[in-house]
Amino acid sequence: MNPARADIQRIAGYTPGEQPQESGWIKLNTNENPYPPSPRVIAAIKAAADGRLNVYPDPLVTRFRHVVATLLDVDPDGVLPANGSDENLTILLRTFVAPGQLVTYPYPSYILYETLADIQGGRHARLPLRPDWSFDLQAARPLVDASTLTLIPNPNSPSGNLWSGDVIRQLVPPRGVLVLDEAYGDFADASHRGEILLSIVEPKPEAQAKGATRHPSLALQASIGEGGEGKRIVVTRSLSKSYSLAGVRFGFAMADPALVFEMRKVKDSYNCDTLSIAAATAAMEDQEWMEQNARRIRATRARLTQRLTEFGFDVVPSQANFVWATHPSGNHEGIYRELKSRKILVRYMQFPEARGPHTETVDGLRITVGTDEEIDRFLEVLAEVVPP
Amino acid sequence: MNPARADIQRIAGYTPGEQPQESGWIKLNTNENPYPPSPRVIAAIKAAADGRLNVYPDPLVTRFRHVVATLLDVDPDGVLPANGSDENLTILLRTFVAPGQLVTYPYPSYILYETLADIQGGRHARLPLRPDWSFDLQAARPLVDASTLTLIPNPNSPSGNLWSGDVIRQLVPPRGVLVLDEAYGDFADASHRGEILLSIVEPKPEAQAKGATRHPSLALQASIGEGGEGKRIVVTRSLSKSYSLAGVRFGFAMADPALVFEMRKVKDSYNCDTLSIAAATAAMEDQEWMEQNARRIRATRARLTQRLTEFGFDVVPSQANFVWATHPSGNHEGIYRELKSRKILVRYMQFPEARGPHTETVDGLRITVGTDEEIDRFLEVLAEVVPP
C-alpha cells in the first residue's frame, strides 16, 4: 500500500535540466550565468563561515530586506526572501490556492507551474499563446476571470519574449493574485527595474517627481493604497541568473505587505541560511557587477541570434539570457543529441499541445547565452551538425 | 479583500524562539549547540565558495546521500536531504496528508506540527501525555488508528524524555505513516544511532551478524522487505543541533525508498544549496567532532539538572540538549522575565490544555544546555532570581 496522497502518486514530478557533475561540458541548458558572482559575494560567504554557524539565522532576514527596500524603494515588510525563487512559487501556491481552485499560466511556458498546482490539489488551465508568442486575450479572458492565481514569467521561457504592461494589466484576475515571475528581468534591453509594473499602475506624483520612472518598486508602492489591481500583484526575483548565484539558492518576492504577511505564515521559520543571506546581501550591494555581466550577455545574445539565423533557424527576439530556436527541418531532438554527443548541452523542449509556426506540436531548442568562447565553440560544433 | 486561503488567514503562524541579532546575550532558548562546527566544515564551505556558485547544485545531493548511506548502512535512495529538518516535515505533510485527513502528535510537544497540519488543511488531534510524560496508550489508540500521519519527536521537546521502542511500536498508524523526529537523538545517553528503530523491527540475521545493533539504518533496512510497519516509518535528522549547524539549514529523512520517491516529487528541485551540501557532507564525515561535543553537553546537562534540583525545581531527566524545569512557585513567566532583563534567554513555554504535576496548565522553562561557562553564569543569575 502506497500511503502517499493520490494527487502525489499521479504526478511524475518536475524534471530539472541535466546537471552533469563532472567537468568538460559546455552547459547551455539551464540558463545559468556563465560569469562568476562578485568577489564581494565570495568574501561575504567566507566571513560568514568564520562566524557563528551554530546559531540560527535571522528568521526575518532583516538586513537583506532593508538592502532591497533601499535599492528598489519598496516597503521592507513587502519583501519576502526565500530559498530560491522556486520556494516563493511554492509558498504562493500554498498561500493562495485551496484544493480545486484554478491556477492559470501561459503555454508554452515554465512547466513547473503546472506541477506546483498539481501538488497543491488545484485545477489548472493554460492561457494559449499564438505562434508569435502573443496572448490570445479573448480566449484567455474567461480563464483569467475564474483564476485564483495567474503566473506569468516575463520574459517568458522558453521563448525569451517580454510582454508589455498593457498586456499584463489585462491578465490580473479580478478576484485573484497575479504573479510576475521576473527571474530573467535583468537581461531585458531596457534596464528592467519594474517598467512593467510601472506601466500597470499610475505612479504617485511624488514618485514621478523623484524621477523614479525606472523603479519597479515605486510602481508597486504606488499601486498600494489606491485600492487598485497592484495590491494583488506579486513580483518574484531570483539571484540565480543575473547575480550568478544558482548554487546558493536565493530569491525574493515583492508585494503588498498584507499579502507578504500571509505568505510568511506558510514558509519554514528559517528558510534562508546564514551563508546564502550573506551572499545575497553582498550581491545586491554590488549592482555594477551584475549590470556589467548582463551587458556582456546581451551583446553575446545578439551575436548568437544573428549566427543562428544564418544557420537557417527561426529565433525569437530574446530579452532573457537564452534564445528559443526552431529549424525548418524540425529535427530539434536530433540536433540536441548530436550536440550532447560532443559534450555540449542545450535544452530540447517539447510542448505537445501548442501550435507552432512549423508543426502542430511546438518543440525546439532553448540555448543559454554562455561566454563568447562557449558560444564560439557551440557554433563551431553546430556547423558540423547543421550545415549552413 | 484578502485573497489568501481561509485556512491561512485563520492561523497565527508559528513563532520561532527569540533570535537577538546583537551580541552580549546568553542564548539558552532555541537549543543551539554552544560549540562551533568542525573546522573541516568551515574549510569545506570556503572551498565551495571558491568553486562554481553560478551553476545549480546537484538536485539529488548524491555525494551526501552516499556518505549517510555508508555511515548508517542505509540505501542511498532512502535518504532525502532537505533545507533543514523543518523542510522535511513540510514535505511529509504535503506528501501524505490530503485535506481533512488526520494528523496526530503528542502533547505537550513540538507545536510546529499543528501549524503544519493547519497549513495543509488537515485535521489534527493531540495524543495526551500523562504528567510523567508517558503516553496514555489506551486513549491514544483510536486517534492513532484513524491517523494518516503521526509525528513523534524522540527525545521529546520540551521535556527531553525518550520513549522506548516498545511504546513507539504501538504508535504506528495501521494505514498511515509514523515520523520519528530524531532532531535531538545524538544527545541521548546511549549513542542514539537507531536503537529505537532497531527495537521496532527485528533486524535481519546478517545485520546482527555484522554486530550492527547500534545502527538505525540497519533497523530501517531490516524493516524493508518484510512487509512490516517499518515500511511506513520515516526517521528525520537535523544537523542543526548535534553538528552545530543551525545557521546552515540542513537535515535529512530516512525511509523506504518507495516513500522517498513520493516525497521527492514534492520538494523544490534544488532545495539544498552548494554551500550547505559541502558543509553537511564534511560534518557527517567528522563524527568524532560531533560525538565529543555531545559528550560535553551530556556532562553539563547532568550538572545543570543537579543544580536546578537544588534550587527546588522539578527537572525531567533529559536525553536531549535541554532540560524542562518547573518550580513549585509556578512563577515561570516571572523567572523568564527576570533572566531576560539580565540578558539571559531561556524559553518560557505554556501548554494551556495539558495537565501538569502542579497546576491545571502545563507551563515551565525549557533551558538549553550551553557551555559550562554559560551555565555557570545562568546559575549565578538564577540565584539572584530564585533564592535556593
Image: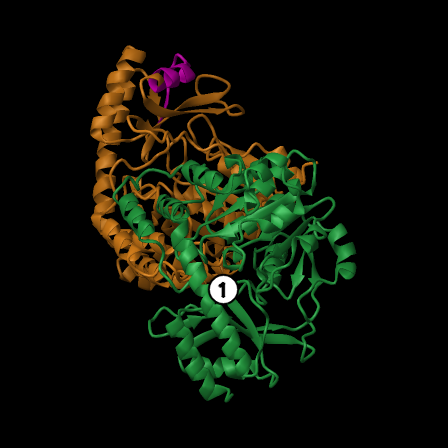
Chain colours: A orange, B green
- Element type at marker 1? loop
Asked if one can make out residue A386 in the rendered structure from this viewpoint, the answer is no
Q: Is residue B369 magenta?
A: no
Q: Is residue B305 left or right of residue A85?
A: right
Question: To which quarter of the image does residue A80 belong?
Answer: bottom left
Image point 66% across, 53% down: which residue?
Answer: B165
Q: Is residue A294 left or right of residue A326?
A: left
- Give B312 or A177, whichever is nearer the viewer: B312
Quarter of the image with the N terminus of chain A is top right
Q: Chain of mark 1?
A: B
Image point 31% across, 15% down: which residue?
Answer: A312
- Give A187 or B79, whichever is nearer the viewer: B79
**x and y, in percent, of residue B32 in the image:** 44, 63
Quarter of the image with the C terminus of chain A is top left
Q: Which residues are magenta?
A: A324-340
Residue reaching furthest top? A387
